[in-house]
Structure formats: C-alpha cells, structure tokens
Image: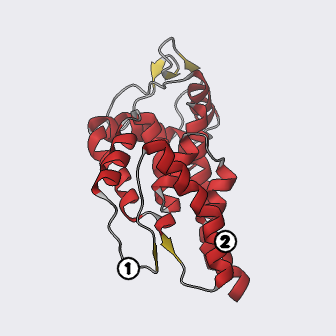
Amino acid sequence: MKRFWKDVAIDADRVVTLDGKPVRTPGRRPLALPSGALAEAVAAEWRAVGETIDPRTMPLTGLANAATDPIANDPAQFAARLAAYGESDLLCYRAEGPPLLVERQAASWDPLLAWARRRYDVTFAVTAGVMHVAQPDATVARLHEAVAAYDDFRLAGLSPVVTLTGSLVIGLALIEGEIDADAAWAAAGIDEDWSVEMWGEDWQATQLRELKRKEFGLGVEFLGLL
C-alpha cells in the first residue's frame, strides 16, 4: 500500500492519527496506546514510512496491533499459552557435562529460580538432560496466575521475550525488573555460547541468533515504553 497521508499526530486518547483520521488495527479498531511514550514511538514509525508501507519496518505498531486485536479478543487464552512455557522452562533443564558448562548454568540460572521461588512462592523440579520433568501443579497454577495478571499490551511485549528465550522465568524476571535485557539474553544463550566456544561459529546460526536478538530487543523496548 502506498503512503496516502501527510500528517501524523496523536489525539487526546493516545490514538495515532493520519491526517486527522485514526490508524486502525487489522481488526478495524482505533490504535489507542496505553502510554504517551509508546504512542510517540508508534507515531514515529508512521512518520518514517516512505512511498509504501512495509510492516517489517514498523515492529512496535505490529506489537500494538497484536495487543489490540488477537490478545484483547481472548487475553486468558493468550496468557495461558505464554504461561505454558513455565511447564518446560529452559532453566530447569541442565547439562550433564562438562563441568564448566554445568557451573555456568548454575551460576546464571540458580539465582533466577531462587528469585522466582521467593517472588511467587513456588518450587521447581530441576533435572539434568532433556527428558521432560513435570513441574508441581501448584507452581504451574501460580505462574499461570502471574502471567494472566498482565494487561494486553504487557502480554504482547512479554511474548517475544519468553518465546525466544524459552524461559517464562527469564521473562518474568525481566518484566519485574529483577534483571535487565542484557542479563536476560546472556542467561538464555549460555548453551549456544558454549557451542561456539567449543566448535566455532556457524554463520547461519549466528545470523539467526542476531535476528532473534533483534526481535527480543523489540519486545524489551515495547515493555519499556509502557
């Protein structure tokens, strides 16, 4: 679609407007943002559009659309899918060796699980290897409850953080301010960093990881703008 507007503004309800008309989501809802900072960032994406609209250059708008349409249509179901990552959280599956990798995982992941235990009054089943280990029912229920308490926009921002790291605990620690984005990404990438150290870089794997890091960063940015 070609650009058809000249002026981008934000109205009193924090709806981004194009020549005075509201931007609408794919579901035809006005794109109303929950904070002035996010509204300004989304408006900036629309101002930066060239001759044609390219959604790939408007990731914050995309996350806002997701919050306003599919997530808002059924937030409980979306929250449940996201919370399900806690049932097989990355931090609960440890390497059997070598010792240095085991130590690195423990040094990074044990404090995060300890924080989650204190914060949510839960316990975790931790195992060595990749065979599934069931988490206590009370833990699963409490983590589902914690995720479901977030609003639609925070769920939208939390989603790429959790899905790209494979860890609900990392996502919750980040959104609760226990760790920053760099620490979250480093914790999630311990196994990949080890593989690079042992076997060297694979350019395709590195390229894919960089793309994931960028998407992860957009989720973090989105959360920060709320």
The amino acid pointed to by label 2 is Arg
Q: Which residue is painted at 52% across and 14% down in the image?
A: 11
Q: Position of residue 159 (x, y in %)?
A: 45, 49
Closer-to-camera residue (178/155): 178
Closer-to-camera residue (1/81): 81
Q: Position of residue 26 (x, y in %)?
A: 36, 38
Which of the 4 image quadrants contains residue 192? Answer: bottom right
Q: Give the mark, 1 or 2, whose residue is nearer the N terminus.
A: 2
211 horizontally vs 201: left or right: left
Q: Are marks 1 and 2 in contact (CB under 8 Å)?
A: no
The amino acid pointed to by label 1 is Met
Kind of element beneath mark 1: loop
Vertical placement of 127 versus 167: above or below? below
Which of the 4 image quadrants contains residue 7? Answer: top right
**Residue 1 visible in rendering:** no
Vertical placement of 137 versus 225: above or below? below
Neighbor class of circle 2 (other Cα within 10 Å; few <14, some 14-19, many 20+) is: some
Give the residue at the far top of this rendering: 12
Image quadrant occupied by the C terminus: top right
Q: Which circle marks residue 76 in the picture?
A: none
Closer-to-camera residue (38/148): 148
135 horizontally vs 94: left or right: left
Q: Which residue is mark 2?
A: 104
Kind of element beneath mark 2: helix
Q: CA distance from mark 1 to mark 2?
A: 21 Å
Neighbor class of circle 1 (other Cα within 10 Å; few <14, some 14-19, many 20+) is: few
63 horizontally vs 27: left or right: right
Q: Which residue is mark 1?
A: 131
Q: Which residue is painted at 67% across and 74% down in the image?
A: 193
Closer-to-camera residue (20/45): 45
Q: Position of residue 61 (x, y in %)?
A: 51, 38
